[in-house]
Image: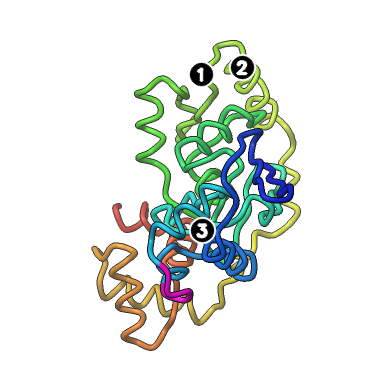
Amino acid sequence: MKSTIIPSILIYNNIVTPPLTPSEQSVIQRLRRWRVATKAALCKRLHCCHMTVVRALKKTGYHNSFNANAAYYTLPQTPAFDPHGLWFHRHIGFSRHGNLLQTLVALVQNAPAGCTVAELEARLSTPVANLLCRLRRQGRIAVVQQQRHALYLASDPAEQRRQLAQRQNQSLAPPLRALAPRPALPAGVGAQEVIALLITLIQHPKARPPTLVHRLQQRGVNLSLAKVRQIEAFYELQKKTAR
């Protein structure tokens, strides 16, 4: 997505829109400085109304986050997307493909050997199992059972065969990854944070991630919701708790 300002006319995606008002220019300048923000934060900082922010974003274009309830916004020029079309600002994720459902479809379709739930959750740092089931029911992706894991594949039968063949080749290949020890801790998470979460889980085994975040804050441990889910996925804590 690209926008260009020519004298007094804004051209975005080949659509001519009215120029930004001074108030709208302030919104865009602030968002460019912050890189990522919610509409509410922009309104509060700039003392402007909600519709001013909406109009400014509509004129310039934007990406909104695929996590955090899609509440965060960034300008089209800000993200430096990785090869998978993803970009993270701290724990807030943005996707070149669109919202979380659209992103899941794109990641599954573009994966040479399909994707498991664990692989997708590790890449997106957010739970996706329920959404994958919905996409499968809608026929936007397919699923097969591979040993103990569900493997999600593209909807096109020919592409499914290629993905399955590649996955089979991977399973037959020598386990080179075994030469490198698995990290003891999730990326960006300290041992004390993991220990605090484990203690809280022992004390409250049925607590959901948002409740765990609250319990941890009461203990003086500031662990974000994304990190709690990252730790759970890394150690497969949800499966162990269920068993």
Residue 18, percent from left and from top: 57, 46
Q: Nearer the viewer, residue 226 or 233?
A: 226
Rendered position, 19 above or below 197: above
Please state the extent of the stretch shown in magenta in the rendering.
44-48
Q: Which residue is mark 2?
A: 159
Residue picked out by circle 1: 155
Q: How is the image coloured?
A: rainbow
Disc 3, SS: helix
Name the residue rendered at 56%, 65% in the picture: 22
Does residue 222 lie above or below 1 as drawn? below
Sequence order check, earlier mark of 1 and 3:
1
In the rendered structure, which disc, 3 or 2, sits on the residue that comes first in sequence?
Answer: 2
> How dense is the environment of label 3, judged by Cα within 10 Å: few (below 14), some, or many (20 and up)?
some
Secondary-structure class at tag 1:
loop
Image quadrant containing the N terminus: top right
Tell me if residue 79 can be seen. yes
Work out which residue is located at the far top of the displayed protein and give it: 158
For label 2, the crowd category at 10 Å Cα-Cα, with few meaning under 14, some 14 to 19 and many 20 or more, is some
